[in-house]
Every structure is written in structure tokens, then in C-alpha cells.
Image (spheres, coloured by chain):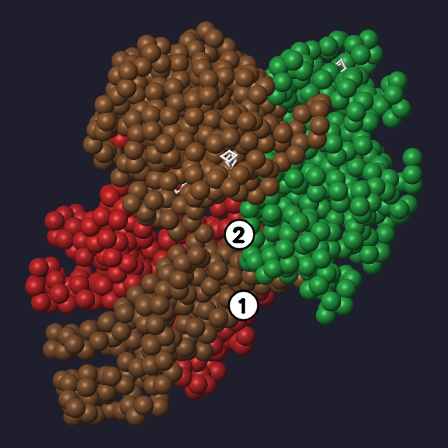
Chain colours: A red, B brown, C green
Amino acid sequence: MEWFAKRLGISVLLVWIVASIVFLAIHLVPGDPAELLLSQGGAAPDPAIVEDLRDQLGLNRPVLEQYLHSMANLLRGDLGNSLMDGAPIAGEIATRLPRTLELIGAAALISVLIGVSTGTLAAVAAGGPFDRVASALAGLGLSVPVFVIGTLAILGFAQTLRWVPAGGFVAFSQDPVQHLIMLAMPAGTIAVGLSSTLFRVTRSAVLEVTMRDHVRTARSKGLSFRRILTRHILRNALIPVVTVLALNLGTLLGGTVLVEYVFNWPGLSGLLVDAVNARDYPAVVGVVLVISILFVTLNFVVDMLYAVLDPRVRHG
Amino acid sequence: MRRLPWVSAGAVGLIILAAVLAPHIGLADPVGMDVAHRLAGPSPTHPLGQDEYGRDVLSRLLWGARTSLGIAFAAAAISCVIGTILGVVGGYVRGIAELLTVRSMDVVLCFPPLLLALLVVTLLGPGASTLVPVLVIVYLPSFTRVAYAGVLSVRGHEYVTAMKVLGAGRLRIMTRTILPNIAGPILVQFSLAAASAVVLESGLSFLGLGVVPPAPSWGLMIGAARGTMVQAPLLLLWPCLALTVTILAMNALCDGLRDMLDPHPAARRVSWFSRFRRRAPTAPLARVEPDTVLDVRGLSVAIGDPAEGRYAVRDVSFQVKAGETLAIVGESGSGKSLMSLSAIGMAPAGVEVAAGTSGMDGADLLALAPGELRKLLGDRIAMIFQDPGSSLNPVHRVGAQIAEAIRAHRPVSAAEARERAVAMLRNVGIPDPERRARAYPHELSGGMRQRVMIAMAIANGPRLLIADEPTTALDVTIQAQVLDLLAALKRDGGLALLFITHSLPVVAEIADRVAVMYAGEILEEGPTAEIFAKPRHPYTAALLRSAPQDDGPAPEGISGTVPVPGDLPAGCVFAPRCDKRIEICDETRPSLFRIGPGRSSRCLRWASL
Amino acid sequence: MSECLIRGEGMSRSFHGGGFFRRGRSIQAVSDVSISLSRGEAVGLVGESGSGKSTIGRLMLGLMPLSGGRILFDGDDLAVLDEKRRGALRRRMQMVFQDPYSSLDPRRTVGSQVEDGLSIHGIVPRGERGARVAELLAQVGLEPHHAARTPHQFSGGQRQRVAIARALATNPDFLVADEPVSALDVSVQAQVMALLADLRSRLGLAMLFISHDLPVVRHLCDRVVVLYLGRVMEEGPVSEVLRAPHHPYTRALLSAAPSLHAESRRERVVLRGEPPSPANPPSGCVFRTRCPHAIEACAAQPPPLEPREAPGHRVACIRHDIG
Ligand SMILES: Nc1ncnc2c1ncn2[C@@H]1O[C@H](COP(=O)(O)OP(=O)(O)OP(=O)(O)O)[C@@H](O)[C@H]1O
Ligand code: SF4
Ligand code: SF4
Ligand SMILES: [Mg+2]
């Protein structure tokens, strides 16, 4: 319990630090932030517009006041208004966030199912034909960038074979089947890299645990192969698998941004990419903040999972 | 250590070379447009065709490599240097320096890399000059962490303390002792970061937020070719291929480097899973006296393929009777563990039983089908091992681990098995067994864990208990407790005990008979008291003279070392270290001479000793 | 007794739980231990795991600060010396470690590791160092050509010889040997012990020999100190302590060690239970939870270390009647 409270405290602290850094980032870069945001290819921006933006972003007020103001707003769930259309950013994020979460969830689920099961099989038959083929495929899967897979998938499955639409989104409530079909391609694309990673770590973790003394003990007890594999090998091998999953969360979230863009999935990243292009600073900050908080939260969840899996962690 | 991965290193080298030479090999201008020939296919002047503005694709690919790799390597190199310094200083100096260097990096890790990059790009605008600092920030924490973790593990080694004792300053220790020992992982991290930076750069460029057009970049090319992918799919394929091949080569190089630096490369390949395919039955069993529990004859065990002739155990025979303790004693590496594990069909990965039988109740354990053998293991045959810490599964409660052993062989309910487990814990003298049954192994002391192991081993009332150095890791006062416990079990249950140890005093304490093992052979066997009083093999005598005692003369020791399997002397295996050696000892490998009732010796000169 | 080289007076050391969040739970690893060695003297420090043996060794080498007490080397208090003087003292005290696999840098040749001491303290001019390294290796029974090898080419016993050569490079007066033979086979143990004994008498080294095994120290040491839970239980001349141990713990330790010959086997005193946690030691005599002679008075206060008949023999037990 003490351990849980401590982890929770650290996570809250991290969220606060992240929020502070994101809000202060604009003051950390050298030069006048408003001018910087408006500068386009070296041409000096119109002073009147700069003044306007400064006003809009509240950059005229003392830094401390700005900071406290934005922190207070954040606590109320207010992320400010977009520079492009003046709409509240929090509202826009609220509609798009569930779609991103769905995509991440689906991708993670596929990856864990495929990666852990094939990894285990490959380890059990280490050196055999299945292991060789699967290992080679995983090596390839790790090497193709996610946007390349997405683009090639569109070229192949949508444009050439015409099996699926090239992208887009239909709400689940409107047409569940179409929704899932449209989810399949982006989720599958993300899963290529992640399942390859999980395949590898599962394979090597299973092999490593197999060499441990306590597995020899399990054999000496006369347990069945299946029981040794599940209770004594896989159960312990899951610990490094979770560690690696946690380490790859950042890549997963980044990959989601690219994949959403490639498949026109209307999640957070469409908003983000548009905002970066338009240099809509408040919108970028909003999205980055939300994803980062999501990231910290996921890490917290992983930590919890870790404690469930490994009693040694719980006892410090 | 393995060799450098030449193929992948060569591929990465070629790609780098192409990037470096791009401006000097007479390529077309990568930004020169030729709108008339937009989307033209391959031609002699443009071997890979022309893009949507009619620019030469080959030239853009090579110049693109220059951009991508340039940015990636610059960023990886800068973050490598800074990160390593931060990690080493944080890890070695600790205290406040650790907080400033390592812990501060945790904050950077709160941002997914791509997001962090986008945030900075929004502020500074796109372009290569933004990308390098962004990538440096993104990869800094990983280098810091790798260096930090390396330092923490290296500084735990006594050779770092030794440098301190020698009076070396911090700077000297960090640069001369710590850095070389963590260079391997950092090198691997460098190639990982470089590969990952190529991916990130191309991703950003793909989104139009990285390299600014018209400069060539793979990501940009892919992004642009998306618009025309139906008319000109090749235009999309070339940069995709270039990117994938580059990353593939860099990843392969990483893996190769990691394998090369991995101190235990063999562990990745062999596993005991293959052990489930057993060998065919061999020779018929010899007749034995009725109270013999285990009868091992002519056991030979080879490391790797028996055809290579690297035998770790050669022609070993012994019997253990009910209610008797046979001790196997010998120096480290003499084959004690391998021999006893192999004798009950539990040979570890990478070794193979080449000959011999192991009889128990009329069956040959070495010829049994896996399922049949499994019925005996944990039921009639049980084992305890040297390191009770690693021999218990850390993630299950000890009570559950004992109950599991019971349920594997007895048709009892889970609740009943749990009750029996508690009863077993009480039997082996664990105080408060109900509570201890719910403990995890790490919550128990070493002595307690060994008691748990013993409880688990005797849970089904085995006839044979194999104990492989069960007290070596324990303190003497705890060792005395465990030896007493084992003696009581043997006395009360008629258990046959095969006790493996390297300590002669322990043998004297508990064994009825002793077999002295050396270089895979049993050199002398017989009743403990007789052998200790009158050894008939020079090795036994030398071992006895080596043991420290609380009275008598100073221990003497034996010069030289145990020979390794596959590199044995031609004659007597002990000849190079023997003080009684004569010429013939170097030529003739002695056989086991029966020298009296229940006694045998493998010395040619046994009669004159 | 000849002049005192190094003296630890009332040494104490506690460790804290560590981390920013868990303060307070501290472990008393060593409390109020005094040990002194004169030139050429070997003292055995014996105790089970967790009794604070290695901590005392490190404290006496100045590798970690004391929580209480002081250490005098040649009359100088280590704690108050300036950096330069301490650096010079470094040269005069050396250490040999337990694990021969972890105590040598796997990436450097043994020659360069033996040379470290020479170059750090500038003892021998650069050009003559090779010869000196060969000489040092010869002193521990190795060949000059071994200098070019890396540690993994040596057996455990040979590594321990290299480690000893490295320690001897600076011509120390004081050597701490922290279980130098525990990880070795008995056949090799005896040889390394013989080497240490020989070096000690030839070079006049003062040696603190740490071990968990009483019989091991018998032939090397003049005196022995028996530790339990960071406190001295008994100390005195080796022959005296082994022949007539007074403290119940020393007796148990001796009788627990298995013996080769049935005739000479002592009556077995098997201690109940396990050592208590140093974070929560018993009141009074720390051994009382396992002591077969414990009486009520043992819980009152820690028994002082009091002299017994033989000169230099001191015992921390209130029961004089059980001797
Ligand atoms: N799985 C294995 N693969 C290859 N070689 C092995 C394997 N296990 C043991 N060996 C080798 O076989 C020989 C005998 O090893 P074994 O562990 O049986 O010795 P031991 O007498 O039990 O030693 P110790 O006292 O150190 O436990 C050694 O040379 C060892 O290196
Ligand atoms: S056979 Fe010869 S070398 Fe071997 S032990 Fe006997 S005397 Fe020594
Ligand atoms: S003081 Fe008491 S408890 Fe301590 S050793 Fe002596 S008799 Fe035992
Ligand atoms: Mg062994």
C-alpha cells in the first residue's frame, strides 16, 4: 500500500513537471516567442500582428502570473483556445482522444497476442524452422518504419487489391462493421513493429528463464511440461516482457501519430499535425500535454502490473 | 566472445560511404527540376526515373541518405558524449550529482519522443538545424541511463574498490576502469539511437515537419510520392526500400554487436526443451541386492556431441542403499553435479548421456519415456540444490510451491495439499509454518529457504534424495542445523541419500560411504571411516591433507588444477598433480581396482600406499 | 608487544535505509569494536555472514567513514588527515578481496593491473616498472609471461595470486584480506594461505584476515576476534581461543564446524534459530536469543569485554561460571 501511494505520488509529480515544462517551453527558447512563432522563412513578421499574438497568448503579463494562470486553467480542464478558429482546445481533444485510445488499445492487444504467443513457440522450438522464420520476420518488422508500412499497405490493400478503404473513420454507433474494418489497417500497421518487439523479448526471456535454477527444481518435482511452461517459465518471463512494453510506450504513441496521419484517422494527431503546421501554439501544447499525461498514466499502470507480477517489487 | 558481425557492418559501411560520396560521383542535381519529364520511368540518364517535378530519383536517394544519416549520426554522437558523461558522473559520484544528471532525465522520458520533437518544431520551425538538437534531447536520457546502469553494475565489482584502495583518483577510476567496462553497451546504444534517429527524422519529414523541401530526404520523398502512388508506385517504393534496408542493416549491426559483447552467448540457443526427446533403451540391467535404491553402471556423459569426445563424466558406477548416505566429494569442476543430474535423467542442456544404465526398481531411468520418468521425479526421487535463493520460484508463495509438488503425484484437493505443505514445513522445523507458507522466497533467510527446499523434496516421501551441495551457501551454524535435519530424515525414513559436497569434514560428519571424484572419474570409493583413516589413492590423501582442522598440522594443498573435459592427460587423470607418480602413470589409464570389501581405487600403486 | 601500527578505537558504523523516502530505519552494522595490530602481526576476524566483518575491514582502510570512534595509523587519526597525507597513507594499506572473479578488471592485462599501484604512487620509474611487475608476479608464484594475459585466462587460485601481487606493488605495511580463500577449492586454499603466511613473515606485513571459519585462521593468525551482529564476543590468542573458547557463541561456532576425525569431534552444540536482524538487535547481549546459557540478566545490558585468565583473552559474557 505504501508502495502504491509512493508510485501514485511520483506520477502526480511527473504530470505537474511535464505541464510546467510544456507551458514554460515557449519562454525557454531564445528570442521573442511571438516573433518566433510568426517568423516564416526568415521574413520579419508584421509588428502589429506580433503584438496581437502576444496579447492573445497573454505573453505581456509577468511569466509567473502566466504560469499560475495556465496551471489553474489546467486544473479546471481548460486548455485555452485555438489560434486558428478560436474554438476551445479541450473540447476538440475530448472528441478525438477516445479514437486515439481505441487505436492504441487495439494495436497493443493485437501485438501482445501475436508477439507473446509466437515468441513462446519460437523459444520452445529454438533453432527450429518456425523459430528461424519468425525471428527473421520479426527482424524485418522492427526495421520498417511505421509510416512506410502504412503507406505500402494502402498501396497494396486499398489501391491495388481494393479490399479495404484507404482510410477514414466511421463511428461505431453508425456502422460497427465498417468501423472495425477501418480500424484494422491502422491498428495492424502499428502492431507490426510492436509485436516484433514483443516477439523478441518473449523469446529471449523464455529462453533465459528456462536456464534458471528454479525451473530445474520444477523439473525435479516431476511437473508436466505444460505446467512448467506456464507457471514457472512464462509467468516469470512476463516480467521482462512488461518492462519492454513500458519502454516502447513512447514509440507506440509516436507511431500512432504517424499512422493516424497516414490513414486519416481523426484522432489527436490530425489536430496536432495541423496545429504544428499552422504553428498554433496553444493547440500543440494542449495535445502534447494530454498525450504526455496519458503516457505518464500508462507508465503508472505498467508499474502496477509489475507489482502484480513480481512480489519482490511490492516489498521494495 | 564472438566475432564482429561482418555482413551488417559491411552493409552499414557501404550506405555511409554512398552518403559521403554522393556529391563526388557525378550524380544529377538532386534539386534540378525537369517538369516536362515528371514521373518519367527509368532511363539511361535517370536510372531510377524522375519524380513529380522531374528530379532525378537516384540522386535524391543518395543525397537523402546524406541528409538522414548526417542528422542521425550527428545527433546520436552528441547525445552519446553528453549522456555518457552525465551517466558516469551520476552513477559514480552519486548523491546530488545523481539527482541532477540521471533523475532529471526521467522528466524528458515523460514525453513520447515524436511529441517532444513536434513541440520543439512548433517553436523553432522545421529544418535540419532544429532536428539535430531535438534528436539530441530525445536520445540523451537513453545514453545517460545505459551509462548509469553500467556504472552501477561495474562499481559493484571489487576491482573498482581495488582501484580505490590503490589510491587512484575519481577521474582515473572513471576513465580507466569504468569507461572501458561500459563501452560495450554504450556502443550498442549508439547504433540503436542512430537507427532510431533515422526513423524519427524520416517520420518528421514525412509529416512535412522535418527537413524543408526541396532538400532531399527519404521521408519527404515518401510523403510526396503518396500523392502519385497509383500512377507511379515505383516512386514510392524506392525511398521505402532505401529506408528499410538502411534500418535493417543498422539493426542487424546492433544485434551483432550485442551478441558479440554478450558474455553468455550460448544461452540463446540451447534449451532443455530438446531434452523431451529421449534416447532409446540400452543394455539390460544388472541384478542388484534388494535394498539397493539406485544402481548406476558405466555412466558416461559428454559435453556437446559425444562424437567430439569431450567427456565430463567417464565410466562411473555406484550404488546407494536404503538408509545409507553416499557422499560424492571432489573439487569444483570434477563433474559431481553433472554426474548426479545425468544419473536421474535430468542432464542439463548441451550435455548428453553417452553410455550407462541407472537402475531403480528394475527400470533404467536413462531409458524411460519422459512421462514415465516424470512420475518418478518428485515422488520417489527428489533433489535439493546448492543455492536455495535461486532454486525456488520467486513469484510464487513457498506453500504453493510445496503443494504443487504434492498434487503432481497425489490425487488430493488443493486445500488438502496446502495443509500437507504446512505440515511439511513444520516437519523441517520452520517456526510458525502457517504464516511462512504464505511467504515468498525473498522474504525468508537462506537457511529457511533450504528448509523449504527440503520440505518440498520430502513431501511425497521419496526413497532417494539427491542433495547437491545443500549447505555450501549457508553459515556454519545454519549448516549444522541442516545437516542434523537431513540425518534425522534419513534415520526415520530409511531414505537413501546421495550427498554431493566439496568438503571432506562434512563428508566425515554425515556419510556412510564416500566416492571421491576427480576429472569425471571416481578415483576411490569405500566406507567413510576406512577411507579417511587409510586412503588408498594419492588424490584422497592429498585432499585430506588440504582440509583445515582445528588441530593437527597446517593444511598442505595440491598444486595445479583440475583438467577440463576434452583435455585430459593420456594416462592417470591425476598424474600431473600426483606426488606418487611413476613413469607408467603417464601411459596407462588405471581401471577401478577392487581392493577390499566395498572398497575400490583407481591408482596403479594402490597396493604400495 | 611491539609498536602498534594501526588501531581502531570504538569503531561504529550504521547504514541508513537509503532513498529519499525511507529514512529512519538504520542498521547498526558495527558497534563499538576496537582492534589494533602491530607490525608483522596477523589478526583473524571471524564471524558469520552479516556480522560486520567486511565493514570493519573497509573502515580500517578508510574506504568508508566511521559513525563513531576513530582509527589511528602510525599515530595519525585517519579522519583528520588532509587529502595529501591520506593519499600517502593509501600506499601503505592494501586489500585482497573474496571473489577472485570480480576483483580483477576483466578488460585489462594482469600486468597493467599490478602496475597500477606503481604508477599511481610513482614508486618506480616508468622504465623499470616492467621488471618490478615481473618480480611481484614471481613473489606470488607466477611467471613473468603471465603479465600479458587477461584475468579470464587464469584459474581462481591464480587470480587470487594476481590480486595479492597487485596489493604488494605499493609495499604496504598493512593488508586486509577479506575472505581471500572462501571462494577457492580446499586444495587451492591451502596454497594461498601458505603464500600469505610466507609473505607476512618475509615482508613484516600486519594482516587483518577476515574469515567465516575459525579453523582456517589457525595457522596464519596470532590473535583472533570473534564477531556476532557487529559486536566483539571474544578475542584472544588463536591457540587459546581454539583450545578453550569461553564465549557460548565461539563454542557453538567451533562445534558447528564439521571435523574430519570422529575422535576429535567436539560435543555438538547446535544453535537454535537464526541471527536476528541487525536493524532490530536484541537488548542486552545480542547473542541471547540463540544462547543456550542465557539467563534473565543477559537482557539487561550489553556485557562488557572482560579479560580472562590468559593474557589478551577477553570475553563479552556475564556468565563466568560456564568456562
Ligand atoms: N551444461 C553444461 N554444458 C557444458 N559444460 C558443462 C555443463 N555443465 C557442466 N559442464 C562442465 O562439466 C564439468 C563438470 O561440471 P560439474 O558442474 O558437474 O562439476 P562439479 O563437480 O559439480 O563442480 P562444483 O563443485 O563447482 O559444483 C566442468 O568442466 C563444467 O565446466
Ligand atoms: S596411478 Fe600413478 S599418477 Fe595416478 S594416482 Fe596412482 S600413483 Fe598417482
Ligand atoms: S551474556 Fe548471556 S546471552 Fe550473552 S552469551 Fe553470555 S550467557 Fe549467553
Ligand atoms: Mg556442482
Callout count: 2
Q: Is residue B191 left or right of residue C302?
A: left
Q: Residue at x 38, y 83 (%)?
A: B20
**Residue B13, image x, y percentages:** 36, 75
Three-letter code for the amino acid on which mark 1 is drawn: Val
Q: Residue at x 81, y 22 (%)?
A: C240
Eye-nearest disc, 2 or 1? 2
Q: Residue at x 41, y 31 (%)?
A: B591
Q: Is residue B473 above or below residue C153?
A: above
Q: Chain of mark 2?
A: C
Q: Is residue B306 above or below residue B55?
A: above
Q: Which residue is mark 2?
A: C152
**Element type at mark 1:** helix
Three-letter code for the amino acid on which mark 2 is drawn: His
Does mark 1 fall on the same chain as mark 2? no
Residue C251 visible, this angle: yes
Which quarter of the figure is the N terminus of chain B placed in? Answer: bottom left
Specify the quarter for ligand 1: top left
Q: Is residue B334 left or right of residue B609?
A: left
Q: Chain of mark 1?
A: B
Query: Outermost residue, top direction?
Result: B492
Distance CA(mark 2)–CA(mark 1)? 30 Å
Q: Is residue B539 left or right of residue A219?
A: right
Q: Is residue C266 above or below residue B145?
A: above
Residue A257 visible, this angle: no
**Element type at mark 2:** helix
Q: Nearer the viewer, residue B166 or C266?
A: C266
Q: Nearer the viewer, residue A211 or C260?
A: C260
Q: Are marks 2 and 1 in contact (CB under 8 Å)?
A: no
Q: Which residue is mark 1?
A: B81
